Structure formats: C-alpha cells, structure tokens
Image: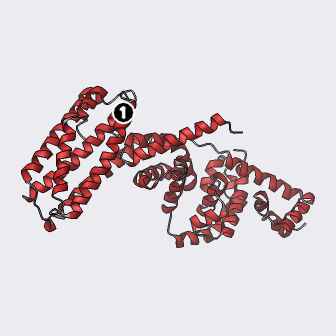
Amino acid sequence: MTTTTGRDQQAAARAEEARDAAWAARGDVAAFERLYRHHVARIHGLARRMVGPEESDDATQEIFIRAWEKLHTFRGDSAFGTWLHRLAVNVLLARRSTLATRRQRFQEDDGVLDGKAGQGIAHELRVDFETAIARLPSGAREVFVLHDVEGYKHEEIADLLGISPGTSKSQLHRARMALRAYLDR
Amino acid sequence: MGANMSHQWTDLLSAYIDGELDEPTRLALEAHLEACAECRETLRELEQVVWRARTLQDRPPETDLWPAIAERIRAAGEQRDESSAEGMAGQRGARRFAFSIPQLVAAGLALAFLSGGAVWLVSRAGAGPGTEGPPRIAAEPADPPVSTATFVSFDATDYDLAVADLRQLLAEHRDVLDSATVRVLEESLATIDRAIEEVRAALAADPANPYLNAYLADHVRRKMQLLRRATALVSAQS
C-alpha cells in the first residue's frame, strides 16, 4: 500500500526529473547526466535482453544520445522514465531490420525455436535464464521481453513490431515453452 | 491421452495464465488439467517462467558509458553550431545590410570582452584551467565551478547593457536586414534569455548553488557565441 508520504516522495522525484529534463532540453549536460545515472540500469537491462549482451552497451549509448536529441519533445505528460523507456524500445527496434524483413524473421523463427525448445539450447547446462532469453530467436525474444518483462500488451507489441496480436501471442507461448529449461539457473 | 491432444491443450496454457481465454475454453482446459498431470506440470513451469521474467533484476553496465555519451553529445553540439553558422553565412547573397557596422562591431566586441571576463572569473573561481573551451560536460559536486558572489556581481552590470544595445540595433534594422536571419537571431537570443532569467531567479533563492552558477555561466557563454557570430557575419559583408 502506498502511503501519503510515499506518494509525496514519488511526486517530488517526478517533479525533480521533469526539471532536470527541462534543463537538459536547454543544453544542460549535467542535468542530463543525472537522468542518465538514474535510468541507465533499467535501459541497459532492456537493451541487454532485446538485442543481446554484445550489443547492449552500444545500444544504450544510442538510446541516451537519441534521448538528448529528442528532449524537446518531452512535455511532462508522463513520467520521464516512461517517455525514455518508450523511446528506448523504438531505438532498439529501429536497430533491427525493416518491417518486411522482421515479418520474414517471425516466419523463419518458428522452426529454430521449435528445435531449440525441444533439444537445442536445453542441453546447454551452463546457460542462465537471462542468457537463455538472449538466445531466443529475435522475434520471440522481442515479444517475450516486451510482454513478460516490460509489461506491454499484445496489441501494443503488435503495433511496435508490425505483426498481428495473434502472432504476438503465439511467439510469447513459444518463448515461454523454450525458457522452461532454464528456470533453475 | 494422445500427444496431439495434449499439445492442443498445452498451446492454450499461456493464454490461460494471461487470462485471455473465453469462459467455455477456460472451463474445458481446467477440466483437462484435473486429469492430465503432464499439462499441470507444464502449466506450473510456464507460471514460473512468467514470475522469473517479472522479477529480473536490472543492473548498470559493467563499464561506465557516460563519458562516451557525453563526448558524442558535445561533438554533436559543436557540429550543430558549425552548421548553424554555415547556414547563416549561406544567406549572405540575399541579404540587404543597413546596419551601422561600427555599432555592431563595438557591441559585439563589448559582449565578447564582458563575457570573456565572466568566463575568466568562473575559471579563476574554481573550474580550473581549460574552462575557456567548451562548457564542462558534467558538474562534479566536489568541484564547484564558480564563486557565486563573483559571478552575480558581474551579471547585473555592463553585460546586460551591451546585450541590450545589440538587441536594439537588431530591432531598429529588422526592416532592412534579411528577415530570416533576424528571426533566427531573435529566437535564439530569446531562448537563451529565458534560461538565464530562470536561473537568475533560482540563484536569488539559492545564491551559493554551484550547479546554478555553472548553468548561468554556460548560457552566458552561449549568448556570447551567438552574438559574436552575428557580428562577424555582418562585418564580413561590409
């Protein structure tokens, strides 16, 4: 249960971030660094799960640079973290291939995922749960991360990825089935 | 129960967990689960996967990415400044000049001198050597960049008068100067002025705040650079 004090603190923190965002939008790099320090763990986690650990540092840098460039579009209607997260998802998806190629990848992923779920990665005993997420085929990984980790709805994911909600649901189920083998790691 | 029949039910388990099945399908699946240990075990594992996903811990990158980000931001800013200057220069052919060039140059030089003085005062007060170049990328709490009394006492005097003179010149000659250039100059000045006014108000309440002083110094420097460019552009056309 959120207390009044807790809500006050949240409101104060949100107002402080909004002020920092306003300063940063006017070119204040120190204010932007404060925003970076506060949000980098979450953004890097998102990047690591969406594009894999090898690309996650580069992707995180790109996200914050894009945020710096787009700060003038932040109006404070939502929390800065929400705005940044949405921008991060867009940047990460933009790093991927075009919409048409993405659709093709979803089709191609089916066989790969079935194979891995049945016997492939399940036999790699040293792979932990996060690494297993990174090794999912890209289409299933994107859906799983957005839905189960980040809390997006299938309709939102469908819009973001250019697929149908039904495809999003089926990819999510396949990802979950594949990840069962890594629950104890 | 055959494998295909079991697979048919398994495919519904994620939707069941997410509460997306219609009532008849949900009831049928629950009846099946009562009788099928394999599907019950699969359901339990899928629920654990969902729980693990929701409880994953975020952690910062192993190496600090901020220095590289700050560097790229700074480089992009410099590139943008250069492009802006080139854009202004590119409008020279269509411009009609009726400025009093000596007046503009004098105002620009006065601003350069006064702003340079401000930067020097900031540097001397605590930012250390090298502050004359681009603004500091990050304010470090242990290294307050400016002495408040020094900067505020400067801020209220001749610098404002020099800026006002140049503003007046721009206003008086806007009918003979290229309108796009005047608009760009005035919008840029207004943006910087708003930031300076806000930080002055904040400094009135918290005059010892090193961050606010650094912010003020940064924007005074920006304003100086903008006016220098404007003056240089006009001089080049004379």
Q: Which residue is mark 1?
A: B203
User: Is A178 placed left or right of B181 in the picture?
Assistant: right
Crowd rating for badge 1 (residues with CA inside 10 Å; few <14, some 14–19, many 20+): some
Q: Residue visible at 20% across and 45% down? A: B164
Q: Residue visible at 12% across and 65% down? A: B96
User: Is B89 placed left or right of A116 in the picture?
Assistant: left
Horizontal and vertical percent position of residue A181: 72, 52
Horizontal and vertical percent position of residue A103: 58, 71
Q: Amino acid at mark 1?
A: Leu
- Output the chain of dot 1: B
Of residue A160 and residue A127, the one placed in the foreground of this image is A160
Q: Does B6 appear above or below A22?
A: below
User: What is the quadrant of the N terminus of chain B in the image?
Assistant: bottom right
Horizontal and vertical percent position of residue B99: 10, 57
User: Is A128 placed left or right of B217 in the picture?
Assistant: right
- Element assignment for label 1: helix
Find residue B100 and report its image quarter: bottom left
